[in-house]
Image (cartoon, grey):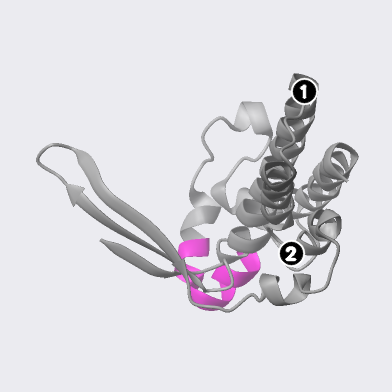
Amino acid sequence: MSWDPITRIVGSLGIYTKIDFKNRQVVECSSTSSIFRGYSLFMQGKDPRDSHFITSRICGICGDNHATCSVYAQNMAYGVKPPAVGEWILNLGEAAEYMFDHCLYQDNLVGVDYCEQMVRETNPSVLAKAEKTEAPHAELHGYKTIADIMRSLNPFTGEFYRESLQMSRLTREKFCLMEG
């Protein structure tokens, strides 16, 4: 099976797998990127100790991964074994970044495909059905219909969208506190 490109990730990620469905086992799996990022070029002539800061700023979405890999590469290159609390701090930073990525991807990049504004323009009959469809567990979250949820995904005005932007900022700040 192959998924290439996987959209919403700059369209440059591809995943390739060979699956043994009979034995329910992934036999082979790899990922590729069809876009040249040039990290090695950015780092030429730079102090390796700056790689954490430089590589984390090349990509506006997955900077933490590049920062963390840079830290691990430096640790290996310099023969450094951080204490357990150092690993905990790194892991806390990664947890914060995981939350950031979820907010960014789920609510700000993908959610717009399902928001009221988009569906009204592209498939108004779906929106009409959503207006009449009760939202499961409305007593817990307060959205009575599926259309209410779709409105909350509207860019810049929807409640989910705005809350997600705030959480993206908060979790990014947590990451920066942990990993710089």
| In the image: residue 49, left or right of residue 151 | right
Q: Secondary structure at mark 2?
A: loop
Residue 13 image point, x, y percent: 49, 67
Q: Which residue is mark 2?
A: 155
Residue type highlighted by circle 2: Pro
Q: Going 72% across and 66% down the picture, which residue do you hit?
A: 59
| Residue 122 within the segment the image draws in magenta | yes
Instruction: Answer yes or no: is residue 115 visible.
Output: no
Picture quarter with the N terminus = bottom left
Q: Going 55% across and 48% down the picture, which residue do you hit?
A: 146
Q: Which mark is residue 83?
A: 1
Residue type highlighted by circle 1: Pro
Residue situated in front as seen by the camera: 29 or 50? 50
Question: Eyeballing the image, is 163 above or below 10?
Answer: above
Residue 29 image point, x, y percent: 33, 53
Dot 1 alpha-carbon crowd within 10 angstroms: few under 14, some 14 to 19, many 20 or more: few
Question: Eyeballing the image, is 172 above or below 86?
Answer: below
Residue situated in front as seen by the camera: 95 or 113? 95
Q: Going 85% across and 39% down the picture, which residue do you hit?
A: 174
Residue 156: name its quadrant: bottom right
Distance from label 1 to label 2 (Cα)? 43 Å
Residue situated in front as seen by the camera: 156 or 69? 69
Instruction: Answer yes or no: is residue 89 visible.
Output: yes
Q: From which residue to which does the magenta span run?
A: 115-127
Q: Which mark is residue 162?
A: none
Residue situated in front as seen by the camera: 142 or 83? 83
